[in-house]
Amino acid sequence: MSAAAPSLTRRRRRFARYNLSARIGGGIVLAFVLVAVTAPMISPYDPLASDWMGVLQPPSLAHPMGTDDLGRDVLSRAIWGAQTSLIAGVASVMIALAIGVPLGIAAGYFRGWIDVVVTRLADTLLACPQVMLAIALAMFLGGSLLNASIAIGISTVPVFVRLARAKTIEQTAAVYIEAAISVGNPVRRLLFVHLLPNIVPPLIVQAALATAVAIIAEAGLSFLGLGRELPAPSWGSMLTVGKDYIATAPWLSIWPGLCICLAVIGFNLLGDGLRRALDPRS
């Protein structure tokens, strides 16, 4: 088994290296991460600074993406908006993982009334569309980036509950779990040392895909005024401004919409590539 494990690891690394989807998706995601991290250094203008003499200017050398209705540079706001989207996407997925994975593992391993309660709760949340549930929670919590991340995270919990539960049930029937039980491993060691590492790969894939959904959800909440407070830049709030000038200043909608599309495509490609690389059947 010790010789087979490194061999499998090498095959996975080699497959991931030449996996076109993972490379393209990872490159797009890395580009957005670098833009978000270096926003204070690469942003050509203050994203909050208004210029009443340059309102609704089309793309030019001075403003490559034009200006908005307050004369603010669209490129600068798009750069800073990447921070908002990535923070909301990653934070909401971390919240969903922290809540959903332990519940799913407990339901799948202990079964009985714990399984009934957890699965019924997850099914109840799944009965409402994820975006609608996030909107309802954001309205209840109030509009802010933190509250939007919490709302999106809670609405994503059922996805990880069901995945963790299914993989736990699948792994508990494996020989290595029976061997670990037979030698007297305590439940805590059994779950976190033996079982959890073997269900991590599908959770990583789902996390990448869920981040793409979270970016769309955050943009939707910001579009409705339930995300990051104005005038802080956000791709969703930029679309809110752009919808009123779609005929006369289409660049206000094109650029933030393109950023959202590229970010979502990047995370989806990364998730698909990770799925192929981490799936032993591949």
Image: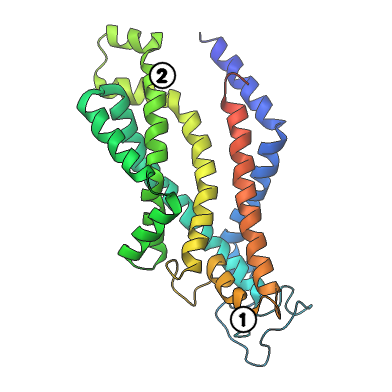
Q: Position of residue 69 (x, y in %)?
A: 61, 84
Q: Quadrant of residue 277?
A: top right
Depth check: 251 or 125 in front? Answer: 125
Q: Identify whether 23 is placed above or below 43.
A: above
191 shown above or below 233: above
Residue at figure coordinates x 29%, y 28% from the top left:
107
In this view, the mark in front (2 or 1): 2
Image coords of residue 219 (percent x, y): 52, 62
In what element is the residue under mark 2?
A: helix
**Distance from the alpha carbon under mark 2 to that under mark 1:** 54 Å
Relative to 31, residue 55 above or below = below
Three-letter residue code for mark 2? Glu
- Residue farthest bottom in this picture: 53
Q: Residues within 10 Å of mark 1 (few under 14, many from 20)?
A: many
According to the picture, the residue beneath numbered tag 1 turns out to be: 72
The quadrant holding residue 82 is: bottom right
Residue lying at the far front of the rendered structure: 127
- Which one is nearer the viewer's eye here, 156 or 136? 136
* Left-right relation of 22 to 107: right
Amino acid type at mark 1: Arg
Residue 170 numbered mark, or none: 2
What's the residue at 37%, 56% (across, down)?
Answer: 151
Q: Position of residue 267 (x, y in %)?
A: 59, 46
